[in-house]
Amino acid sequence: MITIYKNKKYMPNAVCIDFNDVYFNQYTSREIDERAKPVIAKIDGATLVEKYKFKSIFNAELLDIDKLSSGCKTALNILYFPNALVSIKECGDNALSVIFGFEEGNVYSDYPLIPFEFDSVCVSDENGKRIIKEYDELKTWWENEN
């Protein structure tokens, strides 16, 4: 399950990805394989047709992979680099709902970014890690965590 940090200080030795578009274009795009297809379909409604090309939902135009949304690129950064600490600040609800369903990965934001529906997440703070399953409990944690 995804682990949420409000502050980078609780994962000090991790690679931190703050600029998801740049990181995706430089590193993650090279790693794209079959695992990316459902993520791209769920978040951008697009179809990956080859490693560096996808078909747009809007007009079926074939586009370069660097044209994916920032939320989709963020989700793919998490998928391909689960040990990194990835900012989710540029994600919309469509990307957040996919990210919160990942089996592994580490994300952070200093303010609450929560999809209304999720099964459970792990949060990490000065008291260690714990699992949260309810929206209100996660929102309270995020608002009160220093």
Image (tube, rainbow, N blue to C red):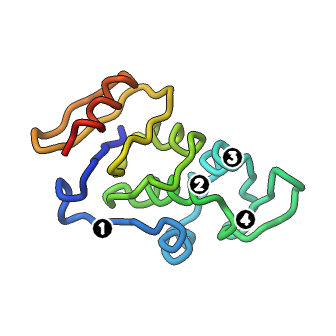
| C-alpha span from label 2 to label 4 | 16 Å
Distance in Å between CA atoms under marks 1 and 2: 19 Å
The secondary structure type at the circle numbered 3 is helix
Which disc number belongs to residue 15? 1
Residue 140 placement, left or right of 94: left
Q: Quadrant of the N terminus?
A: top left
Report helix, strand or loop for mark 4: strand
Residue at 68%, 70% (x, y): give it.
Answer: 52
Tag 3: amino acid: Ala
**Earlier residue among tags 4 and 3:** 3
Against 103, residue 83 (above or below) is below
Task: Point out the tag, 1 or 4, that comes first from the N-terminus.
Answer: 1
Q: Is residue 63 toward the left or the right of residue 26 in the image?
A: right
Q: Residue at x 47, y 60 (%)?
A: 77
Q: Which residue is mark 4?
A: 50
**Could you tell me the amino acid type at mark 4?**
Glu
Q: Nearer the N terminus, badge 3 or badge 2?
A: 3
Residue 41 badge: 3
**Badge number at residue 72:** 2
Mark closer to the chain start, 1 or 3 = 1
* Location of residue 82 (image quadrant): bottom left
Tell me where residue 139 sits by quadrant. top left
State if disc 3 and disc 4 touch (CB < 8 Å).
Answer: no
Viewer-side label of 3, 2:
2
Q: Quadrant of the C terminus?
A: top left
* Residue at the extreme left: 127
Distance in Å between CA atoms under marks 1 and 4:
28 Å
The percent position of residue 121, horizontal first and vertical second, equals 34, 34
Locate residue 22, reporting x and y percent: 51, 74
Counting other residues with Cα less than 10 Å from the Cα at mark 3, is it few (<14), some (14-19), or many (20 or more)? some
Q: Amino acid at mark 1?
A: Val
